[in-house]
Image (cartoon, grey):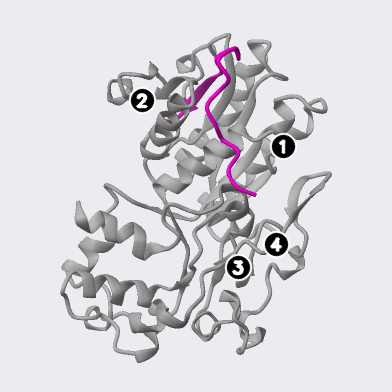
C-alpha cells in the first residue's frame, strides 16, 4: 500500500491540526499539512519561532493555566513536546501530565469524539529488548524516562479505546520513532571530528556492535501526516527506516565521507559490507485486531537474530545483524503505509546533510 495522503477536495471543510510541542519534527508535520490544505496551530513555549503560516500560542504543558482552549474547528492534535532535559520529574510533567491536560481540554471543548490525537513517542519504551522487534513487542522500558513514555502511551491507548466506533477519537494512535536524524542534528559528525568515538577514544567493541535504528526527520513527518489522513490508521506504528545495523558500520561509513580515519578496525564493520546487506522490504501485511492494526506474522518480534537462517536474503538473517546485539526494529508496517521512504537508510540522509 502506498501513501494515501493527498490534497483535500475543494468542497471539503478545512481541517485544523493543533501541534502540541512544535519543534523540528512538529514544524515539518505542520508544513506538510499546510501543503494539503489544512489550517495549523502550533503550541510551544516560544511561539515567535513558529513559521509565519502557523497560528500560534505560548504554552507550558507543566502549567494547567497556560494551556489554552482548542480552536473550535480542531480535527487533529499532534502531541510531540520536548521535555528539555532527562529529569524524570520534568518528563512526567511534560509528557504524562501534559497529555492528560490536553485531553482534558479536548473534552472541555466538546470535541472528544471529533478530534484524532496522535502521540509521537519513542522506541525508548522498548528498552533493552533484543532481536527483531515490531509493533507486537511488549514494552520493556529500561530507564525512568522510558517508563514515563510507556505510561503516556497507555493513557493515549485508553483514550482511543473509549471512542465510539468510526469516530475521529477511535483513529487516535501512536507513532513510535527511532533515533531521529536530519538537518540540524549533527551530533554524529561532531563526535567523529572530535575523535570521541571508536577504539582511539577507549570505547569497547561492544559499543560498535550495538544495533542502531533511525529515521530521517522528513520521513518521520511523512509518517505522522499519513496517520492523520488515512481512513483507518493503525493504532501503533514504529517509525524506523529500512536498515538497522551495528553502529560501528555507521561510524566507519561517515568517517570515510568526512575523510577521517575509520574509528573501528574490525573488517566486519567496514562500510563495504553494506554491498551485501539487503534493505528491509515491506513484505508483510497488517490485520485489524481489537487493539488496532498489527503485523500478521507478529510472532517474529523478539526473535533471536542469531537463530536466523544465515543463508537468508532477508535483512534480519544477515550475518551483520546476527553478529550485533540489541534490538533491530522492523518498520515493515510503516514502509507499507508510506511506500518508498525519502531516505531508506542512513547513507541517503547523511549524504544529503553533508552536501548542505
Viewer-closest of 96 and 321: 321
- Mark 3: which secondary structure? loop
Q: Is residue 220 visible?
A: yes
Alpha carbon separation for disc pair 2 and 3: 34 Å
Name the N-terminal-most of marks 1 and 4: 1
Alpha carbon separation for disc pair 4 and 2: 41 Å
Task: State whether residue 108 is above or below residue 23.
Answer: above
Q: Which residues are magenta?
A: 1-21
Q: Is residue 161 magenta?
A: no
- Mark 4: which secondary structure? loop
> Which label is found at residue 93?
none
- Mark 2: which secondary structure? loop
As drawn, is 281 to the left or to the right of 291? Answer: left
Q: Quadrant of residue 326?
A: bottom right
Residue at the image point whose x is 35% and y is 19% from the top? 53
- Mark 1: which secondary structure? loop
Q: Which residue is mark 1?
A: 232
Residue at the image point whose x is 43% and y is 29% from the top? 30
Alpha carbon separation for disc pair 1 and 2: 33 Å
Q: Which residue is mark 3?
A: 129
Q: Is residue 98 visible?
A: no
Q: Which residue is mark 4?
A: 284
User: Badge 3 local density, few (<14 within 10 Å), some, or many (20+)?
Assistant: many
Residue at the image point whose x is 39% and y is 77% from the top? 207
Q: Is residue 18 magenta?
A: yes
Name the N-terminal-most of marks 1 and 2: 2
Amino acid at each position: 500500500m502506498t501513501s494515501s495522503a493527498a490534497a483535500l477536495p475543494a468542497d471539503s471543510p478545512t481541517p485544523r491540526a493543533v501541534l502540541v510541542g512544535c519543534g523540528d519534527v512538529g514544524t515539518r508535520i505542520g508544513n506538510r499539512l499546510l501543503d494539503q490544505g489544512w489550517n495549523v496551530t502550533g503550541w510551544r513555549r516560544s511561539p515567535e519561532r513558529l513559521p509565519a503560516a502557523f497560528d500560534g500560542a505560548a504554552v507550558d504543558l507543566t502549567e494547567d493555566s497556560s494551556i489554552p482552549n482548542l480552536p473550535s474547528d480542531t480535527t487533529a492534535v499532534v502531541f510531540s513536546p520536548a521535555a528539555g532535559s532527562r529529569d524524570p520529574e520534568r518528563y512526567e510533567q511534560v509528557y504524562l501530565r501534559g497529555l492528560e491536560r490536553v485531553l482534558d481540554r479536548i473534552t472541555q471543548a466538546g470535541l472528544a469524539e471529533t478530534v484524532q490525537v496522535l502521540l509521537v513517542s519513542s522506541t525508548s519504551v522498548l528498552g533493552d529488548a533484543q532481536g527483531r522487534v515490531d509493533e507486537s513487542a511488549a514494552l520493556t522500558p529500561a530507564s525512568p524516562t522510558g517508563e514515563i513514555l510507556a505510561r503516556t502511551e497507555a493513557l493515549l491507548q485508553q483514550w482511543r479505546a473509549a471512542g465510539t466506533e468510526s469516530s475521529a477519537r477511535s483513529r487516535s494512535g501512536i507513532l513510535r520513532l527511532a533515533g531521529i536524524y536530519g538537518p540540524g542534528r549533527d551530533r554524529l559528525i561532531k563526535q567523529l571530528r572530535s575523535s570521541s568515538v571508536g577504539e582511539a577514544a577507549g570505547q569497547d567493541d561492544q559499543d560498535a556492535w550495538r544495533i542502531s535504528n533511525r529515521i530521517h526527520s522528513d520521513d518521520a513527518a511523512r509518517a505522522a501526516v499519513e496517520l492523520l489522513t488515512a481512513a483507518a490508521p493503525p493504532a501503533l506504528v514504529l517509525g524506523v527506516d529500512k536498515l538497522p545495523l551495528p553502529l560501528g558500520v555507521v561510524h566507519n561509513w561517515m568517517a570515510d565521507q568526512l575523510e577521517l580515519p575509520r574509528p573501528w578496525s574490525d573488517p566486519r564493520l567496514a562500510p563495504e559490507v553494506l554491498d551485501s546487506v539487503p534493505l528491509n522490504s515491506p513484505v508483510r501485511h497488517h490485520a485489524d485486531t481489537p487493539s488496532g492494526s498489527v503485523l500478521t506474522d507478529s510472532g517474529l518480534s523478539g526473535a533471536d537474530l542469531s537463530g536466523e537462517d544465515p543463508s537468508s536474503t532477508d535483512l534480519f538473517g544477515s550475518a551483520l545483524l546476527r553478529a550485533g546485539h540489541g534490538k533491530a526494529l522492523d518498520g515493515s508496517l510503516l514502509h507499507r503505509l508510506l511506500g518508498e521512504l525519502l531516505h531508506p537508510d542512513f547513507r541517503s540522509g547523511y549524504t544529503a546533510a553533508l552536501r548542505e
